[in-house]
Amino acid sequence: MNEAERPIPRVLVAAVTAYKSRTLEELARSVTDDVRAVFSMVRSVMVKSELQYIRQLVSSVATSNEADAIIIVGGTGFGPVDNTCEAIDGFVERRIEGFGEDYRRLLRDEFAAGPASLLARATAGVYSQCVVFALSGQTAQVRRAIDVLVLPSLPDAIELATGRMRTHVGRSGPDSMRPSL
């Protein structure tokens, strides 16, 4: 499928918080602006940081086919009110392995986070053919991860999740299946 044939991904941005946070609202707004510049923005929402609310949002958006992808910011720590990773990891049908590792690598390499990067959590997966990314609530780190990890991989992730992709990642087409002579 060439770029012209690809449908424009529809994305929902959600901010997860246990309490009202102006910083998180501003982060969600900036992520929304980044998404809107490239894809079709469905809406932006705030979600209470409890398992059932996060899962209810993902389920509702995915099963109603409201969006092809959900980007969640906030609630990924491991404090007592941070439930985003548990909500997503325990709910998705398939995890996107490596996303959390790449996020931590980004923190180490570009933000000099060093060993503190081990404390950062991020996850991604697929629920009912909807791709879900969950990142921290740290503005600079999330903005960079959106630019270099999420947005570039989103069209391929959606095609893989929905089964619309004609070729696998890294292949140039059907001829790549033929042995070299």
Image (cartoon, grey):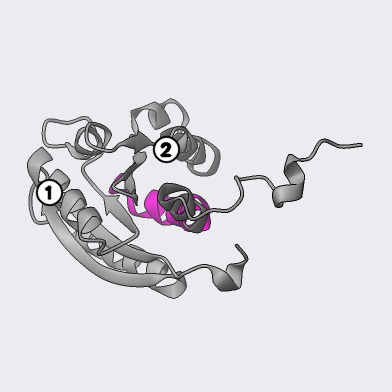
The image quadrant of residue 92 is top left
Which quadrant holds the C terminus? top right
Secondary structure at badge 1 equals helix
**Residue 171 painted magenta:** no
Q: Which one is nearer the viewer's eye here, 14 or 93?
A: 93
Which kind of residue does numbered mark 2 sit on? Ile
Q: Which one is nearer the viewer's eye here, 4 or 52?
A: 4
- Where residue 139 appears, as percent x and y from the top left, is 34, 54
Q: CA distance from mark 2 to mark 1?
A: 20 Å
- Where residue 44 appears, as percent x and y from the top left, is 22, 66
Residue that mark 2 sits on: 96
Question: Number of marks in the image?
Answer: 2
Q: Residue at x 71, y 49 (%)?
A: 174
Residue 56: mark in rendering: 1
Residue 154: mark in rendering: none
Instruction: State whether the magenta stretch is mostly helix, strand or loop.
Output: helix
- Where residue 122 appears, as percent x and y from the top left, is 35, 38
Q: Residue at x 51, y 35 (%)?
A: 105
Q: Residues within 10 Å of mark 1 (few under 14, many from 20)?
A: few
- The segment highlighted magenta reads 135-154
* Residue 33 visible in the current orientation: no
